[in-house]
Image: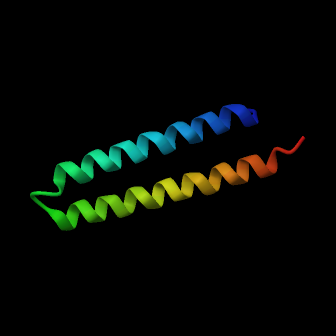
Amino acid sequence: MNKKTLTRILIGLIIIVAVGTVITYFTMQEEKPWLAFYIACCGGVLVFNFLISLFLVNKNFKK
């Protein structure tokens, strides 16, 4: 896999997780606010980890 492919995959994962987190948060906010907050925190951690991975991919593929 080259840098461009890995970058596209990571950006796609970031978008999918962020959109899913927001939809789930607003869906569950009324009935279980504590669970909605927990899901938002987990989604944020995943997005942050994907951003770190994106930075490391771009750093390691200097050619």
User: Residue at 71% across / 32% down in the picture?
Assistant: 4
Question: Image check: 3 left or right of 42?
Answer: right
User: Residue at 21% across / 63% down in the picture?
Assistant: 35
Instruction: Pick the quarter of the image with the C terminus.
Output: top right
User: Residue at 32% across / 49% down in the picture?
Assistant: 22
| Image spot of residue 57 (x, y percent) | 72, 48
| Residue 6 lies in quadrant | top right
Q: How many tags in the picture?
A: 0
Q: What coloring was used for the rendering?
A: rainbow
| Residue 17 lies in quadrant | top left
Q: Residue furthest left?
A: 31
Question: Image check: 20 left or right of 13?
Answer: left
Instruction: Pick the quarter of the image with the N terminus.
Output: top right
Question: Image check: 45 left or right of 27?
Answer: right
In the figure, 3 relative to 28: above or below? above
In the figure, 35 relative to 28: above or below? below
| Image spot of residue 36 (x, y percent) | 23, 60
| Image spot of residue 44 (x, y percent) | 43, 59
Question: Image check: 21 left or right of 56?
Answer: left
| Image spot of residue 51 (x, y percent) | 59, 53
Q: Residue furthest right?
A: 63
